[in-house]
Structure formats: structure tokens, C-alpha cells
Amino acid sequence: MDTLKFSPINLGRWILWGGTALVFLVAPHIFTNSFALTMLTQMGAFIIFALSYNMLLGQSGMLSFGHAVYSGLGAYMAVHALNLAAKGVLPIPLPLLPLVGGFAGLIFGVIFGYVTTRKSGTTFAMISLGIGEMVFACALMFPGFFGGEAGISTNRVIGKPFLGLTFGPALQVYYLVAAWCFLCMAAMFALTQTPLGRMANAVRDNPERTEFVGYNTQHVRFLQMVLASFFAGVSGGLSCINFEIVSAENVSAIRSGGVLLATFIGGIPFFFGPIIGSVVFIIFVVALSGFTKAWLLYLGLFFLAMVLYAPGGLASLLLMQIPVIRARRFGELAVPYLLAGCAALMALAGLIGIVEMVYRLSEQGVSTVLTVLGWSFDAKSAAPWAVFGLLLGGGLVALRYAARLVGERWGTIQAGLQGRAA
Amino acid sequence: MEFFLVQTLNGISYGLLLFMLSSGLTLVFSLMGVLNFAHASFYMLGAYFAYQISAKIGFWPALVLAPVLVGTVGMLVERWGLRSVHKFGHVAELLFTFGLAYLIDEAVHLVWGRSAVEYRVPAELDGPLFQIMGSQYPIYRGFMMLISVAMLVSIWLALTRTRIGLVIQAALTHPHTVEALGHNVPRVFMLVFGGGAALAGLAGVIGGNAFVTEPGMAAAVGPIIFVIVVVGGMGSLAGAFIASLLIGCLQTFAVSLDWSLGGISIASAAPVLPYLLMVLMLILRPRGLLGTRDG
């Protein structure tokens, strides 16, 4: 008997991917200033990085604290390859440079992955941290290859134009990054549908049963690690093209932590979660860091709030609304959401005020007078502390009540939905 | 010979300091299954609290107050943070402590600035303790060793000779039975977490002025204590002790030796050595020196 085959045209999926491609195409024409274009380019490279990280954390249950190693070493190899190409030694066109990074990442993934994937869970996390620190220490030890503190710089405009493109202008670089990003997104999504991708999920959920079914969990983890390292390397190669410099920061624990934060905030249980996370993360890193020096504190608080209250990340918060919207009952939630949003904004305003005042008081040589919406005040006087303290306290109390209201409405709606389904 | 003796003493005092850190980490890990990523941040917090307190009322009150404060912070963190993520599993707990480390680091930046603070050895402990063949050995190093050893002995006594120590030991292996016998196991968890944080805080008080108190100190020592816990064997206190002394001596000797191997001097390779040791250990003996669990 023939095996049954059922393959309808998955219209929703085509629309989704087509829409994604369209967003990539038109985004630079909507956000036209150069600052936005830099941000979009960085987002593209970071999306690949975060998705590759989620191949480990979300899909295989491996919490890595050293993922920057693979993207960073990929970037180093790419920068050396680019410099060789500029000398005419290595005939490689610029658009294929990320592949150099990718294969470098893959090779290091094989080497380090062999050691790290012997363990899982907490021990894996600690070992990945150790490997990350080791590579970072090496980066400062061998200045010949890694360029020491200053790093290695390069120039992406080399040789003859490739198909008429020089990749000098930022827009051309954006489209190069976007093309790679789309390609990698599709490839990584396809990987989740393969037997390996499915077994990785099994290893994450129940390693013992996976072994009983006849799979070597260590081998599955190793393969996922190697593939994730490849994509991380591609993203490293792209960031090398974008920034034209690669330094020890590229392999540092800061970058490894960053990708963890971005991926988790976006939502690790969903394939598209890290994409949302990357967008939010780059906005924090690039845009918010221009406004305040305390941006890392806000990012850390945001992350902690997600760990405590929304372990599925932003993606899960969005997806939770879909059944409610489908049942046309979102209107019942609108008012509680609005109240909770207002309370959260109030608490946030109080918090930001206090943090900024603390910062002004501790930093030497900075004026302690702050101006918000035309209201000037001195961080040394008591009045603003009282105002912001009240805002924060009142906001938190209000948030507690609003959250309870949301929870009650949510409960009745869920009960209604389940009643209808039954 | 004299070089060897002095370096061994330095290595042991550094190793004991590392053990004060790794013992708290190991204890919390074996009791709660939580790897506290923020452990080194508690160490840093201890140093900064001690700096602030000793600037106001002196070093000796700081020696007691700073660890108590850090311990209180640890207990609050356990009660209001860690306990509520417990239901999401170990990865979520690890992520929580990771975020906490971020937060503590940034809070320290915010309150005490980005450069090192002047947290100094008190005048009465400043000076040479004795002379070994012409070279002086500072009092403060001896004081560090004294505090570490006193601390370790009292922990050992508390764990083996007191009632709460016995409850903790029992809760390590059989938490449900202990709970059924009427002990408040979550409170035991809170106390142990706070105790581990206080130990890290104490290490910060005596390590902060021996080395340097700056916002990067947590990131510098954090990975090392994780290496110690892996090399010693996850959850083994005795293993952590041996690994601490080993890595303490290894680093002290590597920094002071001026040999070179294939163009790379040993001193410049010093930061990599603990990690190499860890990788070697994982290849040759994956469970660590005295570890019992594999995987």
C-alpha cells in the first residue's frame, strides 16, 4: 500500500513569508533617515544571530552563555578573508563573505561543541560560559590574529563592483543583510521541520525517552550546536561587513548575554519569537542608549519582568490574544488592558525618575538639575523624590489591581471559550 | 625557594577566598538545584557595602554588617523572586539569576560610578606580618586566611553539629520527607540562599580591599567560580575546596612566573589556564574531581 500523502497549498504560510519578504523590501523606504537604516541593518544581522541561538535554547533546551564565540570567530575569519580579498589573494566576492563566517562558525562549533554537548542542562550552561571566557581571554592573548584591544578593521569596498553593486552605500549593505536574513530565516525554519529538528524538541522535552526510542541525545545536541554555530557565523560575517571592524567585543560575554536577553524577551517557545526580540533589543541598544546611560538597567528589569511573569516572551503575549480576538471578545479586555497600561506607565515614570536622579547624584561633574516636559527640578531637593516615589508606589498598587481585573476577565473569557469548544 | 614559599602562601589565601565564594554556590546548587549566576554579584555588593560602611563607621563594623546586609538582600531575592520562578523549572531559575546579575551590576554602576572606589585595607592591618628569607609577608593576607578558615570551620560545625544544619543536610537529599516531618523547607531554602549570599558578601568585604573594588570585579571572578564548581564536581563541597586551592595556586604561580612557551609567556596565558583545566577535566573525567552525578 502506498503511504498516504496529503500536501495542500499552505496559503497562510505563503502569505506570512511573502509578507516578511515585503517588509524587508519596503522597510528602508518607510524609515528613510540614515539612523533608521543603520538600525534596520543591525536588526537583520541580529535576527539571524538570535534565531540561531534559539535553535539551542528554544528548540533543544540548551542554555548557552557563550554563543558569541561562534558569531565572533566567524566575524574574525570573515574580516581576514575580506582583507585577503582586498589584496587580491583570495578571489571571493563580498556577498558570499558571510559564508566564510558561517563555515568558520561551523568548524569551531564542531571543536567546542564536542566538549560542551557532552553535558546538558545546568552543566552545559556553565561549560559554555567557560568556553566563552576562554576564547575571550585568547582574543586578548594573540594580538596577531585578533588585533588586541583595537580589533581588526577593514574596508568592504573591494575590487570590481559585483553585478554593478559596490556595497559602499548603506542601502546596498542593508539589502545584502536583508537577503541573507531572509535566506537564513527560511533555512532555519525548514530545519525545524526536518527529523533532526523534531528530535531536538524531543531531546529538550524528555531526553530519557528519546534514548529509549533509540536516539543518541548527545549526538542530536551536537548536530544542533554545529548547525546553530553555522548560522551564528553567517551573522558574524554580516556584522563584519556592516561595521568594517571586528574586535574582542564580538566574542565577549556581553554579546553572549545580549543574544540570550533578546531571544528570551522575544519568546523562546516560538520560531518567530527571536525576531520580535531582536527588533526590541536593537531598539534598546541603539536608540535608548543614546538617551540614558541606565539603558542596561532598564533592559535588565524588562528581562526580569519577562522571566517572572511571561516566560513565553512577547510572542506568547501576542499569540494569547488571537483566540480572544477570533471569538470577538477582545472588547471586554480593552478597558482592563488600558487601565493596566496606564498603571504600568505611571510606575515606569516613577522608576525612570528615581533612576535618573540617582545617576545624576552619583556621576561627578554632571548637573543635578533635570528637565522633564518643561518642569525643572534639582535631584538634591526632596520634592522630586517624593513625587516620583509616589508615582512609583501608586503605579505599582494600581498595577496590582489592574492585573487582578485583567486576570478575572481573562478567566471568564477562557471559561466561555472552553465551554463552547466542549 | 623563598619565591616558592611566598607564592604558595599567596595562592592558598586566594584559593581560600575562592572557596568562600564557591562553597556558597555549591551549597545552594546542591540544595535547590539552582545555579546562582548572581553569586559573584553578591561578592561585589559585599565589597561596595563594606566600602560605604567603613567610610562612615569603620572597617570592623563593616566586616559584620556588610555580609548581613548582603545576606538580607539574598533572602529577599529568594523570597520575592526565585520562589515564584521555581515552578517554571531550573532553566527559568538560572535565567532569573542571570537577569539579577545584570541588574546588580547596573545598579552598582549607577550608585557608585564606573571607576574603582577607594576601599583600603585598615591601618591596623597594613604592614608586614613576618619575614621569610628577606621578603615581607603582609598582615592582611594572613588576616584573610584567618577569616576564611574561621568561616569554613564554623560552617562545617553549623552543618554537622547544629539542628538547623542537620535539617539542611536532610533537605539536600530528601526534601519531601523533611517537609512531612514538619519542617518549613521553603524557609530552609531561603536561609541557605541568604547564607550563601552572606558568604559571598564576606568574601567581598575581605577581597575588595585586598584586590580592587570596581564594577568589573563580579565579571572577573564569576566565571572562575563556575569553573571551580565544574572541576570540583557539581555539588561536591570537598571537590570545590580542592579545586579552589588548585586554581588559586595555578593563577598565582602563572602570573608571577616569567617563563615562556613558544613565544607566549606563561603570565599572559594566566587568564586562560583555569578554562583549559576545565576543558581537560571534562574530556578526561566529565564528572569532576569528586563529583558523584554525571550529566
Image (cartoon, helix red, strand yellow):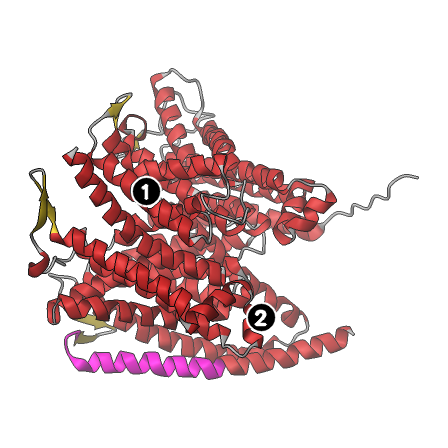
User: Dot 1 corresponds to which residue?
Assistant: B247
Q: Position of residue B262 (x, y in %)?
A: 29, 21
At x 15% / y 58%, what residue is drawn? B117
Q: What chain letter is assigned to the residue under label 1?
A: B
At x 24% / y 82%, what residue is drawn? A386
Residue A171 vs A29, above or below: the answer is above
The answer to whether A336 appears left or right of A372 in the picture is: right
Say which of B109 and B291 sits in front.
B291
Say which of B235 and A258 sits in front.
B235
* Start-end of magenta stretch: A378-402
Q: Position of residue B265 (x, y in %)?
A: 24, 27
Q: Position of residue B79 (x, y in %)?
A: 43, 73
Residue B237 vs A92, above or below: the answer is below
Numbered label attached to residue A151: none
> Mark 2 belongs to which amino acid?
His
Numbered label attached to residue B176: 2
